[in-house]
Image (tube, rainbow, N blue to C red):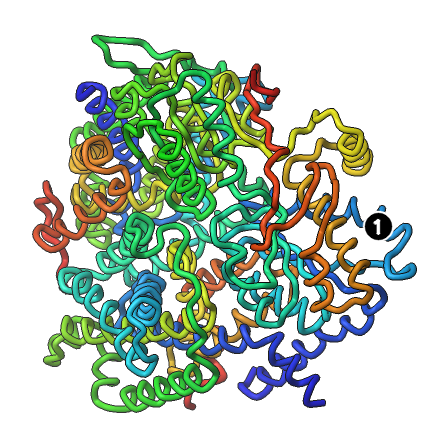
Amino acid sequence: MLAQQLVNGVLLGATYALFALGFTLIFGVLRVINLVYGFYFSAGAFMALFLTRQYGWPIVAALPVAAAGAGVLAIALDWVLLTRLRRVGAPELASLMVTLGAVLALYAASTALLGPDIRRLPPDLIGAEAMVIAGVRITAAQVLILVATAVLVGGLIALMRGTRLGLALRAMAENPDAAGLMGIDTGRLAALVSFISGALAGAGGVLIGLNFNAIHPYMGEAMMLRGFVVIIVGGLGDIRGALIAGLLLGIVEVLTAGYVASGLKEAVAFAILVAVLWTRPVGLFGRAVVRRA
Amino acid sequence: MMAWWDDFFWTYQNLVYALGINGLLALSIYVVLAVGQLSLGQAAFMGLGAYSSTIMTVKFKLPFLLVLPASCVVPVVFALLIGGPTLRLSGVYLAIATIGLGEVLRAVYLNIDYFGGALGLSGIPERAGVGAIYGLLVVALLVLWLVGRSHIGRAMEAMRTDETAAEVMGINVPRYRLGALLASAVLAGLAGALSAHVSSFIGPNEYGFEPAVTILSYALLGGIGTPIAPVLGAWILTLLPEMLRGLADFRLVFNGLIIVIAVLFLPRGLLAFRLRRS
Amino acid sequence: MNRRHLMTGAIAGLAASTLPAAAQAAGIPVGAIEILTGPAAAYGIAIKAGLELALDTINQKGILGGQKIALTVEDSAGDKNQAINAARKLIGRDKAVLIIGPTLSNEMFAVGPVTNERKVPTIGTSTTATGITEIGPYIFRTSLPESDVVPVTFKKAQARGVKTVALMYANDDAFSKSGFDVMKAAAEKLGLKILTIETFGSKDTDFSAQLTKVKGLKPDAVTISALVEPVSGVLLQARQLGFGKETLFIGGNGSNSPKLGDIAGAAADGMIVGSPWFIAKPDPLNTAFVAAFKAKYNKDPDQFAAQAYDCMFIAAAAIERAGAADSEKITAALAKTSYTGVMGPFAFTAGRDPASSEGVVVLEMKGGKFGIAS
């Protein structure tokens, strides 16, 4: 039973990490806590739902298209909401508030439009039958999540560390003004980061919607609290940190529910958050200096 | 005419109470915004005030005159717990930690039978009324107005506009921020206690993320130029859905858009342009 | 806009919104408070449909010498404050002599004290939590509390050889929590061994930790008290984790919805649920109701519509027997109700709860549809 619980924990943790990837990327480069991020997550899931239900697309086709769609949506919303604030160099709380208002309006409007009901992807989209490996049960959707998380984390780290683009992004994260002077087109880079993070969110929404088989407008909001815990504990902007923190949180939550009390599952996440804020605000794996007031 | 008035007041009594209570909540977020911080825990502080005061009234049978001031204690303790580590850091940390606070308190109320679990606490006697609610609102407005005109108010404004400059001027920024967060917890706690004692029932799902954002939209609609502005914002946002029934469905869309528009285009608040001292 | 204009505007607006009361005065004013918008709107909309279908019949003949009942349905959106405002408006402005609703038990705990203070009889048609009618002498309910339904279901399970149970419930809404309290009490009373109690949130999507733990304990039955969405989620994930036919799943009132089969499909097969009403109940009154409902709304009625349908007739009969549109007299008449409707014979106990649970049937999921359990 412990083996199964650990697998459950790793799977849950992978969904948290998957959700947090783009979230922490936006902060890492653009220095914004972009709360609309949760909406890209819902939007990606709904696009995949539409493509598979309406047009009978297979999941391999619907997943990248939905991710790209969420990415384009992210460029558009970032442009509407944040370019103005970036131009005047507004404090980060201003952008936090704008995205907060926007995401609330977007969730409420999409609920009014689509209804609050939980929707499901077509049942035969991916085998729901579990495979049994050494007494541990795992489904195809869960394997897909593990693989996708590993590939995306690896790809992002390679992009940031090993390419010229990554260098430009890191320069922009360090100091946007200086990066601009050095000839980096910060406007286009911001759009690119928005697209990547929106696409990550969209892909996460599809995969998680597929795994738990539940898609509804507020699904992004439900993940948001865990997303906060993961990016703070992992260190704001730290991609590898987000992966480790996500897995850790998933395992701790599952073990708490399995061996202590299921009601404490949610409180555990927050206890970790407060403990990290008190003792190591840069995050468990953070090296960056946290800007102090 | 008297009978008509009695019926009229009875019908809208809850709304009259809500206007006063939401006014206090608007002031509670105003205090935090005034030092350039953002808290999304005002609903959580309100919930702490509501739960602690209800327990004092229902389980310990304490008199309301004692319960009301005591209802600030628990919110203040939690404000210290959250504000202590985060206020030394940049503003996003407080915002994130306070969002989390609302969620975890909900889990606590739900899982501990003493707090009634999902059934909430019911049978709360009606101890508060127009006098208590509006009396406190007027006192809070006066105090905040006086503080705003004093050297504390000028320090707060300096921090909001340029915190580095404020530090250079010798203002102890973290201490002011903590002070503001504690004051806001007091106001929200009082509002929670008052609302619990006019509505006979409180539940664990009333103090989460959405009410916190609604409280923020009060202040951003009104603007934070003077303390009266956020209160007016609260009144408008409380009255509008009552008067325009169709709007009720889109209340959250509306509140969200107000925040977006206010921050992007009218940083002084939608109403502020008429209220600012010229 | 300056301050004075704002306040005058507000008061003028409020005064204007009280005016339609006079225009609506034709007929006997009855109010209903239901959830018509928001996440739980499906329940309120079903109830409203049931009430209005009954009203068609009642108003054809009229009561109290040909008068019509003027029903005003206010939306609570599932929000406590909006429900209280609605109750105050219905009583203060519309002078409603009787209130039906509100939809959720939590709302009743907030609204009940207000209507009870004004001595206006209030009948819940869907409030199944414990303690509803203890709010006051003017609070009634026609919905069978879970404490009457669950033991019937559990006895059926025991007859099938169930000796050990694991109890699961959503701990964040009043309905699921009080359903669980009842299940726990019933299991203890029947001598079923409770192996574990596991909670989850109504909006959770991952139940794997709890289910894995339950599976390790090998209970004969797993009971779930939650609304239909999370119940479906639990069942789907349970099948993935390898729960098979050897485990009996038992649902509460929340599982008693055709949506269970729509969402969970074959994963829900074999689940048993107790219900105060069953659409295919072979009873002429019931068949006529189902046919009339289908004709008017072009869909099948559910339990909530059936309960509301009966409630409207019970209320109308009480007003008729009271002989006047007077709240105090209607309350007295309600207490003496003896009525046979689509749910079966109905009377109130001295505590204003339904007197008989004879109508309860145990249903079982087969191929995505409910049928009578064998």
Residue A253 in the image, given as x and y percentages of width and height? 22, 36
Quadrant for the N terminus of chain A, please: top left
| Residues packed near mark 1 inside 10 Å, few (<14), some (14 to 19) or many (20 plus) | some
The residue that appears at 30% across and 91% down in the rendered structure is B146
Residue A199 in the image, given as x and y percentages of width and height? 38, 33
Q: Quadrant of residue B105?
A: bottom left
Quadrant for the C terminus of chain A, please: bottom left
Of the residues shown, which amino acid type is indicated by label 1? Ile
The answer to whether residue A99 is above or below residue A222 is: below
The subunit carrying tag 1 is C
> Which residue carries the number 1 mark?
C58
Front residue of C331/C228: it is C331
Give the side of residue C348 with respect to residue C193, left or right. right
Give the side of residue C64 with respect to residue A183, left or right. right
Residue A84 visible here? no
Give the side of residue C323 with respect to residue C368, left or right. right
The residue that appears at 28% across and 81% down in the rendered structure is B66
The answer to whether residue A61 is above or below residue A169 is: above
The answer to whether residue A183 is above or below residue C286 is: below
Front residue of C84/A36: it is C84
Residue B85 in the image, given as x and y percentages of width and height? 13, 60
Q: Quadrant of residue A135?
A: top left
| SS category of the residue bearing label 1 | helix
Give the side of residue A38 with respect to residue A256, left or right. right
Front residue of A118/B144: it is A118
Residue C174 visible here? yes
The answer to whether residue C70 is above or below residue A120 is: below
The residue that appears at 39% across and 19% down in the rendered structure is C162
Residue C346 in the image, given as x and y percentages of width and height? 68, 43
